[in-house]
Amino acid sequence: MTETILRSFGQGTKPLLIIHGGAGHRSTPLTPDGTTSAHAALEKVLTAGYSVLSAGGSAVDAVVAAVRELEDAPDFNAGHGAALTASGTVELDASIMAGDGRSGAVTGVSTARNPISVARAVMDKTDHLLFATPTHEQLSKWDVETVDPEYFITEKRREELAAFQKQPDALLQHGTVGAVARDADGNLAAATSTGGIVNQEPGRVGDTPLVGAGTFADDGTVAVSCTGTGEVFMTEVAAHSVHDRVSLGGASPNEAAVAVLDRIAIRGGMGGMIVIPTSGTGLAAYNSGDMFYGSFDSTGTYTHV
Ligand code: ASP
């Protein structure tokens, strides 16, 4: 079992943003250029999200701003540059939850530029929680920017799919993006977005668009965004399990995150998560060998690529 790495950020009840760019990227060899570009992208993402918090904005607005930037960057598996299905298409998933209990999610997006904005529209503008493959009419009713599906597909991902189909390697099937935030009013939010896993069968859905599994937030406990073996994160209802361990089991957020990742490993999965509690330090934890992540608080930014 790979050891769980844990890193803490922030303090007290101050505004805090933590982001991730997916677990397990070291299994996908990055060129030196790729690493540099991912690092620059994370800095941009942190600045976009934290500027919302430092201006007194809400945790929901901050996680949406951060995840939109992550989706637009080609370095991560979400939005533009997402992993391709076995048919060479994109099927994008996203979810968001506010700490007051509101949430929205979407799966099978291929024509909305920012799936996280679709999830937010579902939360803000509909009576429902989860939509599959929203129609063009629904997207325009929700005032979401649409694009041609080709916008999402990069040459790097085409090459990755061809290489995978020649020689499958489960270690390559990772990547997702996410953000968790605590705002100046003490409200929490979590958001997660993904292209799923390379070469997944069309129609496969992982944990990312499932509130409770890939994303969860409660103003009284924690905000959580996950990345990793989707099937196992679903089985463990991973994000909600962190909340349960804190609220019912009396665990610290650190203990809860490590315990959930241990359960994931016991079931044959791997991955990571970012967590911010109502009060105290936030964390990034992973047992996937590596994970892109970063944070921004009143002392400045930190990134790990
Ligand atoms: N959890 C994502 C999925 O199963 C993949 C990942 O985060 O690595 O779709």
Image (tube, helix red, strand yellow):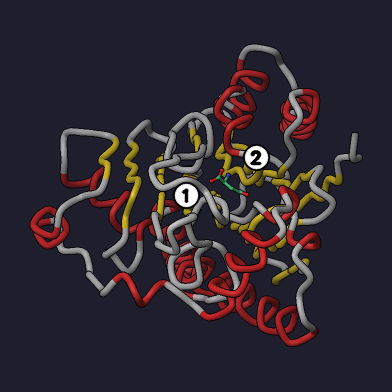
Instruction: Please state the horizontal and vertical placement of residue 189, each as a whole percent of the image.
Output: 47, 45
Task: Residue type at mark 1: give it.
Answer: Ala
What quarter of the picture does the C terminus occupy?
A: bottom right
Kindly state the secondary structure of the residue where label 2 is placed.
loop
In the figure, 229 relative to 53: above or below? Answer: above
- Of the numbered discs 1 and 2, the one sitting upstream in the chain is 1
* Label disc, if present, on residue 229 of the rendered structure: 2
Q: CA distance from mark 1 to mark 2?
A: 18 Å
Say which residue label 1 marks: 191
Between marks 1 and 2 in the image, the one whose residue lies nearer the viewer: 2
Count of numbered labels shown in the rendering: 2
Instruction: Please state the horizontal and vertical placement of residue 219, each as a whole percent of the image.
Output: 48, 34
Dot 1 surroundings within 10 Å: few (below 14), some, or many (20 or more)?
Answer: many
In the figure, 164 relative to 94: above or below? Answer: below
Instruction: Please state the horizontal and vertical placement of residue 287, each as a whole percent of the image.
Output: 81, 42
Dot 2 surroundings within 10 Å: few (below 14), some, or many (20 or more)?
Answer: many
Task: Residue type at mark 2: give it.
Answer: Thr
The residue under the point 60% across, 68% down is 162
* Label disc, if present, on residue 260 of the rendered structure: none
**Label 2 beta carbon within 8 A of ligand 1:** yes
Kindly state the secondary structure of the residue where label 1 is placed.
strand
